[in-house]
Amino acid sequence: MKLTFLSADKALTKSYSKLSDGTIEKSSYPNVWEVTSHIEDCKDLSVLEHLLAKHAAQGHCLLKGMVTRPLVSESRKDSTDRNATTDFLVLDIDGIDPLFTTMVKKFDPATGESQDVPQINTVTIDSLLSDMGLGNVSYVLQWSGSMNITSNALRCHVFIMLNKPVSAPLIKQWLIQKNHEVPVLRHAHALTKTGNALCWGLDITACQADKLIYIAPPVLKGIKNPLGRMQRISLIKKTQATFDLMGRINTTEQNRLLTDARVLELRDQAGLPKRKLTYKIVGAHEVLVKPGECIATETKIDRGFVYFNLNGGDSWAYFHPENNPDFIHNFKGEPTYLTKDLLPAYWEQLGNQAFRVSSTGKTYLAFLERKTSTYWRGTYDSTTDDLDIWPAKTEGMVRQFADANGLRLGENIPEWDMEFNPHDNVRVDFDNRTVNTFQLTEYMRPPVRKVQACPPITLKIISHVLGGDLEATEHFVNWLAFIAQERDRTMTAWIFNGTQGTGKGLLMNKILTPLFGKTQTVIKRAAELNEKWTDFIAGKFIVFIDEVQTSAFKDEAGVIANLKNFITEPTVTVRVMNKNAYDVENFGNYLFASNKPDPVSVDKEDRRFNVGVYQPLKLVLSDKEMDIILAGTELQDFFHYLMTFSVDKRAASTPLQSAARDALIELSQTTSESTSTALKEGDMGFFMDQLPSSDAYKTNMLTLNKVEEYRKVLLDMISRTKTSGMCGVSRDELFTLFDFTVGGMSAKPAMFSKFLGHRQIDIKPISQSGKTVRGANIAWADTAQFPSYLTNHFPEIKTKVKP
């Protein structure tokens, strides 16, 4: 026959230490996940003795059966058949008292009657085997590691060769039968911690082909070898080399009746309430009905199972698979239990949770998100900090996921909160029932190191997108550094303006998205800004709006108002289809990209938009440079550069004043806004620039009159302007200015005054050439240019005007 021994990265044995107070401290057998198999040929007991001694010395253990495949530092899951046939017996004698008291009949001459008197018998391995019908069979004896350390109870393994292979289930029934028939073994019966089954003096599970038989000597600290000179493993020869087990063996039902009767007997002796032991089939399991409640005094998760010590026990013999908590199994030969019957408190706890943490560190989640009433299910891997959860359309989908992954949900699915909080690295807060969707990117994880210069190809792309403007490039890098360091909104946005192929998409897709996270950045088409659903803004560091031209929107004012809100407000309202709107904390920073000359309408009072210089040239990268960008070679250095950049927070939240920005503001203004701005800023040059550049207007009498009236107003304003620049301009003169530059003005004074008021030009009584008229006081800022205005536009005027 062949034997399978297993080794691991540590000795598979117990250790015992004697403490200073004289007590003995023990450690359990190590729980190992990965093992390596060693296959040996064994023809008889003498070879078995040698192999046991050899592998015991190496800290190995014996597998009762065979593996279906060689194991090399791997789990033995699904590598054995627990019910396979076997060529040998292992009798696991577990704590038999060497002194056994029996009652015998003794004749009393004084009374002439027989009386029951106690008789103390010494129990040895040979006497026990003889009582079991094995007195003439040779065997190998291996004393257990705990023998003679904490007590003198008999603890050992007895190995006996069979004359022919026998199935494990049949051997189990034979072991149960012997536990009832042999007085010494029956006397060793005790109730398990559940009070529903027997503790056996002779282990009834050692027959299973997946059973581990620990054979290595214990590690002793401060304790002498309790066996003295006695060999821990030895061959005991008798007249028979093998044993024929196929005699009369009780049926499963016969043994159950014996066991149930013994349990009831011991319960009565222990003063426990009487109980009828009944069973039922639940799924693929036969379970004990109404087993009585137990307390899980200790719980641990290991090797894909949840283990329990019940009612103060220490054997870790009760368990359920991590992904199936419905049934409690055990190593003690007890019935299977429904978890809800045996451990109701634990079962209720499972039902109130929205998660299950596996031994591999993966957490299974299923919950109802409170704010949006959305079902979620998925996993969180604490070893990689990877959160992988997805919404479920129905409660049934959540329960299906939970059932498939051993996550028990009660009648009501637990409610949790979801948030995006980049200032908290805790992803799943079990106590507060909160899931944080913020995830560190791979570039955020390493310790920050100082990088002196921006990686060259990255800098080349940024600079090109911004039209090669050095000041804009520095301002943008400072803006990015603020986002990287603060993980917050800057309250300003950037407008990228240029022809196709300037690198705008490359910057977003290959640099910013991987740096800040695929789920924490988003690219949207400008057309989508017209939609009322705004779920794309939640949980984002960078929002990239492509192909934007706000002037093309039907409701441009409404779109611009929303964008300004998104850019600056600390909280924003998220609107999702078929869900109630809700508010979230805002971390968004916006980039607008366009090939149009007027991507976003920017007013002069704006404090949100940075504007890059228009880039008419396509970005040119060599093959080597493109390979570096596509491979992300510079990304880690660029992120370190941003993290160690000396950020100017005020600059990050302030738009860069530039010619490109001024040009876009001017382009964004309507003619009436431009005229109003020129008056409020005292820009006489604006009005001079509106004059015709040729005399062609003189051919049309209506046009001639309008131009001449406009020229007269300009001359009158120049002549009346004081050295301080102040000039009173009447409402009629203002009408002439607006009607010429804008056109279509209402001639009604009240309507025109209201028009001016909307543009912050207040009409009130003013003094003009010694008279009081209604108008506005204008402070011209360019009086120094008045002489040149007259020279260029009024050459017929010879009078020298002093500014």
Image: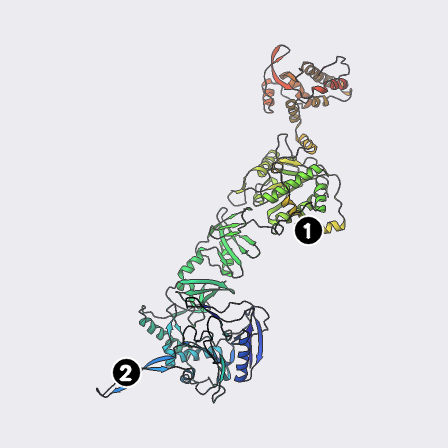
User: Which residue lies at the image location 51% right of the left edge and 68% below the top edge?
Assistant: 30
User: Which residue lies at the image location 42% right of the left edge and 58% below the top edge?
Assistant: 348
Q: Quadrant of the C terminus?
A: top right
Q: Residue at the far bottom: name it.
A: 239
370 or 306, nearer to the observer: 306
Instruction: Identify which amino acid the numbered label 2 is placed on.
Output: Asp
Mark 1 or 2, which is nearer the eye?
Answer: 2
Which residue matches tag 1?
632
Instruction: Identify which amino acid the numbered label 1 is placed on.
Output: Gly
Q: Is residue 227 above or below residue 705?
A: below
Q: Position of residue 617 (x, y in %)?
A: 75, 40
Name the mark on residue 140: none
Relative side of 787 to 556, left or right: right
227 or 515, nearer to the observer: 227
SS for callout 2? strand
Relative side of 346 to 590, left or right: left
Q: Is residue 800 above or below residue 184?
A: above
Q: Position of residue 109 (x, y in %)?
A: 23, 88
Q: Quadrant of the N terminus?
A: bottom right
* Disc 1/disc 2 C-alpha distance (Å): 91 Å
Which residue matches tag 2?
116
